[in-house]
Amino acid sequence: MKTSYFKFTDIFYKLLMTKLMIARHQIMGKLLNVSIWSFCTLVIFGHVMPSMGIPGNFALIQFAGVLGSAGLFENYGNIAATIMDMAGERSIGYYLTLPVRPWAVLLSTACAYAAVGIFLTLAMVLLGKVVLFNSLSLASIAWGKLLIIIVLGNLFYGLMALAIAGHVGEVAKIGNVWSRFVFPAWFFGGFQFSWYAMHSASKLCSYAVLANPITYIMEGLRIAVLGQEGHLPWVVCLGALTTAIVLCWFLAYNRMQKRLDFV
């Protein structure tokens, strides 16, 4: 059994490294893309909007929102790439022929997506410091909580990419990914507002967005950056996000199993 376990671990590691080696050729382009969007967002909300009466700490709210968005926007491209691969070269089909369980192939793919997302998110921390200057104190960040949410959040995004790709399936429907899945989940997930702000505006909507895992990613990041006050409890964010990861894994596996017809 130990031999079988080590063999599986070795294959899983090689699958993960192979996908990361492929991704590294595009990493600078991905970093540039997310940096441009993040830079524009932080400049506007950090230096322009305060002159219009927006509270000074709103820049930090947006900073946390940027961190929660980097991995999600990165995985929008992964969703499209996965759909096109299934319709064309089907390289994922090759990986499924290897002597390893199909779930290991899918999990290694999600972990590779997550690893790239984690790198991009951490890079946005540095960009945020450069753009926001003294408005952002790195010493005041709860780094342990920040790293936990960044890792869990990007793992969720990686699994979400597989689930959506498996659901959409057809190249002709790639346009539906942003408008029907990514944008609504992101925009109502708290990119520009806290859960309590939504609760003050509409109790019904605030309870509805609790079903959105991105809500807990955004709230968890703001707890790490701004502190616990005014946000959902940390343990609730952690528990809900962990549950969402497990549920998303089963959904992703089920959708990809039907789409790729593996046993």
Image (cartoon, rainbow, N blue to C red):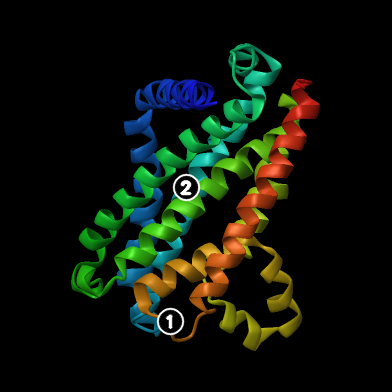
Q: Which mark is residue 71?
A: 2
Vertical placement of 180 versus 172: above or below? below
Name the amino acid, label 2. Answer: Gly
Could you say where residue 240 lies in the image, as x and y percent from the top left? 61, 65
Q: Nearer the viewer, residue 185 or 106?
A: 106
Could you say where residue 50 lies in the image, as x and y percent from the top left? 35, 79
Q: Nearer the viewer, mark 1 or mark 2?
A: 1
Circle 1/circle 2 CB separation < 8 Å: no
Q: Which mark is residue 228?
A: 1
- Label 1, label 2: how far apart the Cα atoms are: 23 Å
Structural crowding at the residue carrying mark 2, measured as other residues with C-alpha within 10 Å and reported as few (<14), some (14–19) or many (≥20): many
Q: Earlier in the sequence, mark 1 or mark 2?
A: 2
Q: Nearer the viewer, residue 46 or 219?
A: 219
Vertical placement of 191 versus 18: above or below? below
Structural crowding at the residue carrying mark 1, measured as other residues with C-alpha within 10 Å and reported as few (<14), some (14–19) or many (≥20): some
Q: Nearer the viewer, residue 45 or 115?
A: 115
Q: Nearer the viewer, residue 53 or 145?
A: 145
